[in-house]
Amino acid sequence: MVLGLYRLPAEGAGYSVTASVSSSPGRLRPDPPAPVPAPLGERPPRRELPARPGHRWLAGDLHTHTVHSDGELSVAELARYAAAQGLDYLAVTDHNTTSHHAELKDAAARYGIILIPGQEVTTEDGHANAFGDVGWIDFREPPDRWLDATERRGGLLSVNHPIGGHVSWIWPMEQRPPLAEVWHWSWLDPHWTTPLAWWLAWDPTAVPVGGERLAPAGGGRHSRDPDDLGGMRGR
């Protein structure tokens, strides 16, 4: 059993596990599901930005959480909220779990938004988003194995908030993931250029046009604050 704790103090920590049983042997009675929010009425008008012929911009967020980890909203509530903000897509990336994936298809259809399955692989030495329906990525393995497993299964790996305080990215890697998060909700000054400098240092080939290159990403967070969503605009 994995309790989801990735960081413990040196002196250890106490914990308790509560097991619920029912009056019917062999049959558990889970709590009734939370009410599903009503379908969205009118959506905000689509953002129209200049784009190359045959392309258009989509508004979205590549880093969000739900009650499946440390978020405040259910999958359905988050999907409805994001659609109400005018977002076209949302990556749902709960910490060290994929239990939310089973709810994405219905919520996406109900609220008219693309929901990308994801997982935030979470450790004390750095966090990374595994995008795609790639199964569970084991946070207890070294990051090169996260990257290998994600790519073998058709997904993408992103280094998250690489200068994010006590969870800054300090993992050494032999290969570099194709994405790096250069904007995060916790960086309140939009003129702060350190994340961009980290991005360039992480992959010197990121700027030239053509060929493979590291892509910049942005992420929101867990709450209802309108400023917390819409951290990424992608084509």
Image (cartoon, rainbow, N blue to C red):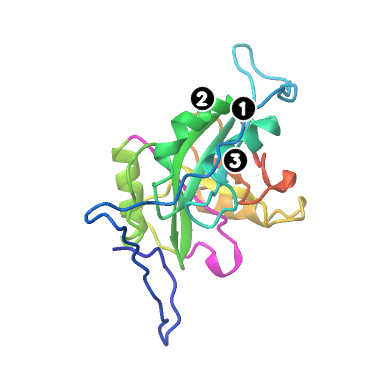
x and y percentages locating residue 17 in the rendered image: 36, 71
The first of marks 1 and 2 along the sequence is: 1
**In the drawing, does residue 163 fall left or right of residue 131?**
right
Q: CA distance from mark 2 to mark 3?
A: 13 Å
132 drawn magenta? no
Kind of residue sitting beneath label 3: Glu
Residue at point 77%, 55% (across, down): 189
Q: Which mark is residue 27?
A: none
Disc 1 target residue? 39
Q: Is residue 110 above or below residue 138?
A: above
Residue at the spot x=47%, y=51% of the render?
Answer: 68
**Label 3 crowd (10 A; few <14 / some 14-19 / many >=20):** some
What is the number of the mark on residue 109?
A: 2
Type of amino acid at the residue the image marks with label 2: Ala
Is residue 157 placed above or below 43 in the rendered structure?
Answer: below
Q: Amino acid at mark 1?
A: Pro
Give the residue furthest to the bottom. 11
Range covered by the magenta-colored residues: 154-170
- Where does the image place residue 127, in percent across and percent down from the top left? 48, 57
Q: In this view of the protein, which residue sits in the foreground, 4 or 143?
A: 4
Quadrant holding the N terminus: bottom left
Residue on which the image places disc 3: 77
Extreme-left residue of the structure: 26
Q: Are marks 2 and 3 in contact (CB under 8 Å)?
A: no
Badge 2 or badge 3: first in the primary sequence: 3
Q: In this rendering, would 25 be left or right of 186? A: left
Mark 1 touches mark 2? (CB < 8 Å):
no
Labels 1 and 3 touching (C-beta < 8 A): no
| Label 3 secondary element | helix
Q: Nearer the viewer, residue 89 or 15?
A: 15
